[in-house]
Amino acid sequence: MARIQLNNIQKRWGAVWGVRDVNLDIADEEFVVFLGPSGCGKTTTMRMIAGLEEPSEGEIVMDGEVMNDIDARDRDVAMVFQGYALYPNMTIYENIRFPLRMRGVPKEQHDALIRRAAGLVELVDYLDRKPSALSGGQRQRAALARAIVRQPHAFLMDEPLSNLDAKLRQHMRVQIKHIQRELKITTVYVTHDQIEAMTLADRIVIMDKGAIQQIGTPDEIYNDPANTFVANFIGAPPMNLIAGRMEQGSFTAPGVRVDGLPAKHDGKVTLGVRPEDCTVTADGGHLSGSVYGVEPTGDMTYLTIKADDKLIEVKAHRDYRADLNSDASVGFDPKRIYLFDTASGQRLR
Amino acid sequence: MASARKRSRGESLALRYAILGAWALFCLVPVLWFLSIGLRPRTEIITPQPIYFPTFSLDAWHMIWEDWPMGKYLRNSVLAIIGSVIIDLVLAIPAAYSLSRFEYKGRDDIGFYILSTRMMAPAIVAVPIFFLFRNFGLLDTIWALMLIYAAINLSFVTWIIRSYMLDIPKELEDAAKTDGAGELRILWEIIIPAILPGIITASVIAMIFAINEFLFTLLIASTPDAYTMSVALANFTGGSDGVIYNAIALVAFLAFLPVFLVVVLIQKHLSRGLTMGAVKG
């Protein structure tokens, strides 16, 4: 329903930077997730799209129209908040009806629209209740129904699932993705949960300290990280990053030696390898150290190896067991080794 | 084991009732006492020995209704109080909204200035207020009482409502904005219903202050046209009859009763909790 462009968006409060130089083009019907740690500027960026915050510089464009001077109430975007933000004095029916009343939708259409929206989130039986009489998951669904009832140009969702328990979160995730695909509405979603980002997004925008670190599909973000921040932020456990030196295609760090790497990056280099691309070998692997921790989870075993003062995570076979402090050797998948410039953190290709 | 736990739970419940009962009695005894003074003959009020079972008498009741225009005083009180509370709410709600929600220079100073009007002794402004009302031709009118009560109470009514508004999550307003509501609509449909307990609390306290107000009422009201219950009490303390204690007690009880009934009727709303469920608990 809407293409959203952010052109050189900045947000400052005095000397404090909230958002720096954000450039992003969100296609019509796309599902974009802003992902980053607390305080990275993702919510501020979303609030600027909603019109709840004014950019210090830059342009917000929706379907070719510059939105900077247009009030939140006139932007025709619907927002779902982390704390639900249901109106406590109104029933769920009245809550869902509120945006219809505010936007002058003819009265005779209200009931059908409300029941359709409530149906999509399986809340038809709770319409006459007040928000205080609903559980967390039901309140979140009510907030979702209020957002979808009027078919807005875009959905903005600010960590909508962060107050729910893990099981409910998974269920709601599927529901949100299903509804977005069904209604074909451009969606911007803010989260600090990488699983939500990976599962929901068409594209992920990773932010840190107010700036975009990388924009890409979940596959690109995971398999082709642009810098150590992205590499370290995505993946559970995150990518192992080992600082060392490169000389003529050989990487060395205490307890680590990897040969046969591209010879063009001499000097201080950080080597990255994901835990699932590491395998425990009898000996003669790329890294040798001692077993620091063994954590069986049922479907796999997380193994932590200590090499010098570094802890390296390895995803091992579910049957793998080892004694603490016993010697261990780990091999890296040579096709899955990433190199980063240690000083700047940027990827070396 | 289970029965021991049951017994100790019963005992703790009984203890709670005993403490609450004692407290209720402590609060209620003065009220019942002056009611009993109001319903006994004058001869049984000041005696060398306490009278535990006084003679029931409606002397004071007949006196206040037949010899004095008590109905008129009561009506004046009610009109002045209700009027003043309405004026207070009309002014305080937008003021509190502004103080709690908008950022502007000097906002906190203005908030403090509003509250500081409560810090001076009312007698300081008594004479200027008298001349002010005289110049406006408002002396001895209910309108003047409404204005003066409203002025006295406006600062803390604003302050109480402001504190309730500060508790309303900002997300609620943001949600209403993105839903398409303007500022006035947000105030009317979202904020006011959510802070209703605060508005009721502030109104009840304003009513209590207004019904007890004496100094300015005495200054402004010079005939029964504008006398209120509090000034009427003073009518029973002078003259050839001396201090008529039973009439004073009965009028005091009648002045107490309406506020008491209002509090009982709305006590559910006096507690907070309306915002429960709006945002995560």
Image (tube, rainbow, N blue to C red):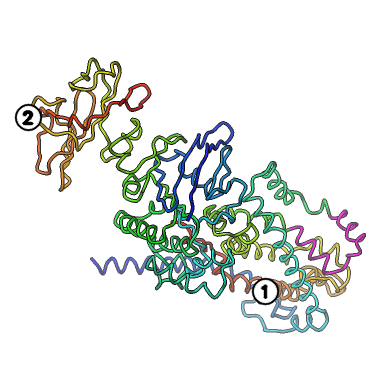
Under tag 2, what secondary structure?
Answer: loop
Quadrant holding the C terminus of chain A: top left
**Of residues B261 and A331, which is closer to you in this image?**
A331
> Would you name the residue on which mark 2 appears?
A282
> Would you name the residue on which mark 1 appears?
B258
Residue at 44% x, 72% y: name it: A115
Residue that sits furthest to the front in the current view: A64
Say whether residue B267 is left or right of residue B147. left
Parent chain of label 2? A
Residue at 58% x, 46% y: name it: A66
Name the spot of residue A174 as percent of width and height, x first.
32, 57
Single out the mark in the foreground, 1 or 2.
2
Name the spot of residue B18 as percent of width and height, x first.
45, 68
Residue at 79% x, 73% y: name it: B76
Report crowding for label 2: few under 14, some 14 to 19, many 20 or more residues within 10 A (C-alpha): few
Q: Which amino acid does label 2 sit on?
A: Ala
> Is B135 inside the magenta-drawn segment?
yes
| Magenta-colored span | B126-152
Say whether residue A233 is left or right of residue B74. left
Tag on residue B219? none
Residue at 22% x, 20% y: name it: A251
